[in-house]
Image (spheres, rainbow, N blue to C red):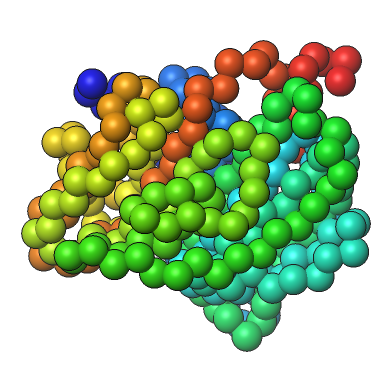
């Protein structure tokens, strides 16, 4: 089954901080339950500058934040105060409602990472708010290093629980390496290239482009044809067929919601 489509990034401004937005896109509503995908940076801030996303609300979703570089200070109305650092996944479930702020710390002048939103299924959309933090181990194969944020992949399983089956992983592939690995055939899959470029099932993905594949195959093949390591984010999940309305930071089942 070939790659369905290639989703180009859309430059988006978040209060003076530019990001590349992959989802939502007119050609791709979601990858599994992932309905929002921002690729942040790399941004090098001048002294005394950075991101300052003031308290804002969310409903009906969970946010997944993963950094390659930098540091973000998180505070939310559930009483959680946490630092988001490279190699540490943070998943915040809004449930029926939460407000949080995200501020880069002055000790780190570089910010680079991704943030994703996962839609909650209708029967779980009013869950009690929650915050989960996990530091995944590195899974090594020949010329490949992976960290599993959520779900199971490459022999590792994340303890982060989610309301729908899904997969999130960072994968670094050494130069000239081809890696074929088992995945859930019932999942849609998306691959974002963060650095370098890769071939995803023989389709070339340039930097910052998201390749999306429909369910049906039980493996993926990633090749790094360059002479430098390539880093990708791999997403997956069962097709999400519920009708939703997504407006600003809110997800509901109707405009009345």
> In front here: 61 or 134?
134
In the rendered image, the quadrant that contains the N terminus is top left
Can residue 76 be seen by looking at this rendering? yes
Residue 185, quarter of picture: top left
Give coordinates of residue 80: x percent, y percent: 83, 65
> In front here: 50 or 27?
27
Give coordinates of residue 175: x percent, y percent: 13, 63
Residue 144, compared with residue 24, is above or below; it is below
Residue drawn at (29%, 42%) of the image: 182
Q: Name, please, the residue furthest toward the bottom.
A: 107
Residue drawn at (49%, 33%) of the image: 237
Left or right? Give the position of 49 relative to 223. right
Disc tally is 0
Left or right? Give the position of 73 relative to 190. right
Give coordinates of residue 34: x percent, y percent: 55, 35
Give coordinates of residue 181: x percent, y percent: 25, 46
Residue drawn at (90%, 64%) of the image: 79
> In front here: 30 or 155?
155
In the rendered image, the quadrant that contains the C terminus is top right
Residue drawn at (39%, 50%) of the image: 153
Can residue 15 be seen by looking at this rendering? no
Residue 88, compared with residue 4, is above or below; it is below
Residue 36, compared with residue 109, is above or below; it is above
Residue 228, compared with residue 15, is above or below; it is below
């Amino acid at each position: 089954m070939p790659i369905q489509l290639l989703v180009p990034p859309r430059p988006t401004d978040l209060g003076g901080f530019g990001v590349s937005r992959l989802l939502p896109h007119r050609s791709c509503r979601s990858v599994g339950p992932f309905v929002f995908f921002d690729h942040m940076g790399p941004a090098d801030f001048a002294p005394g500058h950075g991101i300052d996303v003031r308290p804002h609300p969310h409903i009906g979703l969970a946010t997944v934040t993963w950094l390659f570089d930098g540091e973000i200070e998180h505070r939310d109305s559930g009483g959680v105060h946490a630092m988001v650092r490279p190699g540490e996944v943070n998943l915040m479930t809004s449930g029926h409602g939460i407000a949080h702020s995200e501020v880069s710390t002055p000790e780190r002048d570089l910010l680079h990472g991704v943030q994703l939103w996962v839609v909650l299924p209708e029967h779980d959309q009013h869950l009690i708010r929650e915050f989960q933090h996990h530091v995944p181990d590195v899974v090594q194969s020949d010329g490949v290093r992976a960290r599993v944020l959520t779900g199971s992949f490459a022999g590792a399983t994340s303890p982060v629980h989610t309301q729908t089956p899904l997969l999130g992983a960072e994968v670094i592939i050494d130069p000239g390496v081809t890696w074929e690995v088992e995945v859930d055939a019932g999942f849609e899959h998306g691959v974002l290239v963060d650095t370098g470029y890769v071939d995803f099932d023989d389709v070339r993905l340039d930097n910052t482009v998201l390749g999306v594949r429909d369910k049906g195959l039980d493996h993926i093949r990633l090749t790094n044809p360059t002479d430098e390591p390539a880093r990708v984010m791999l997403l997956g999940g069962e097709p999400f067929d519920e009708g939703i309305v997504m407006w600003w930071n809110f997800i509901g089942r109707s405009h009345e919601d």
